[in-house]
Image: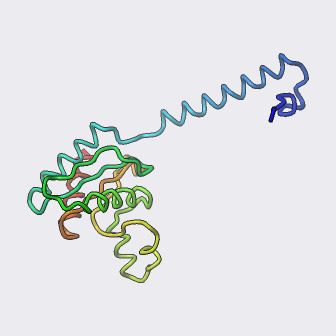
Amino acid sequence: MKTNVGNLFPAVQSKTQRRRAILVGALGLVLTWEAHAQSTVEVDAATARKVISAAIVEAQKGPPSSIFVVDNSGALVAAERMDGAFPASAKIAHGKAETAAAFWQSTGNLENAANGGRAALLSSGYVVMQGGIPLKIDGKVVGAIGVSGGNKDQDEAVAKAGAAAFAK
């Protein structure tokens, strides 16, 4: 299927005017993308490793854990599955991190909501158990940490230690 540029810009008559209109539109898209790219704050790999390192220090006080850090879209930035952590802990930790990023709040809050009668959360596909904490800059969620391996209090403590390192 051919697209006739003239049909896209009916008010523009000449070939030169159409080209200018296309260039101006393209420039506008580039400038919009550039402005968005500059204003978007993401968690980089070095920062994610710093978060994970701090979390590991706390995790060493209990059972081995899996620790995942995601960006604000839930995409994986870095992860660590400590020696001896049970295999499913990796999937659960990743799910907790994705959930905290998606809901902009801790998975502990969501667990409390589910236990308080918001049972629909349980069938949402998200992991609503303590151990997922959003990472924020100036109140804006830029990523999240998710931890699994211990009981809910241990997972929460490990996640909080990682989040505290991010806040520094």
165 sits left or right of 25 in the view: left
Residue 159: where, in percent of width, then height?
A: 24, 58
What is the quadrant of residue 153 in the picture?
bottom left
- Tell me if residue 132 comes above or below residue 163 in the rendering: below
- Tell me if residue 124 comes above or below residue 137 in the rendering: below
Residue at the outermost bottom position: 117
21 sits left or right of 156 in the view: right
Residue 96: where, in percent of width, then height?
A: 34, 61
Residue at the outermost front position: 1
Residue 59: where, in percent of width, then height?
A: 14, 57
Q: Quadrant of the C terminus?
A: top left
What residue is shown at x 33% (from left), y 56% (from top)?
A: 94
Q: Quadrant of the N terminus?
A: top right
What residue is shown at x 27% (from left), y 36% (from top)?
A: 46
Residue 42: where, in percent of width, then height?
A: 40, 41
Residue at the outermost left position: 61
Q: Nearer the viewer, residue 122 or 42?
A: 122
What residue is shown at x 38% (from left), y 59% (from top)?
A: 100
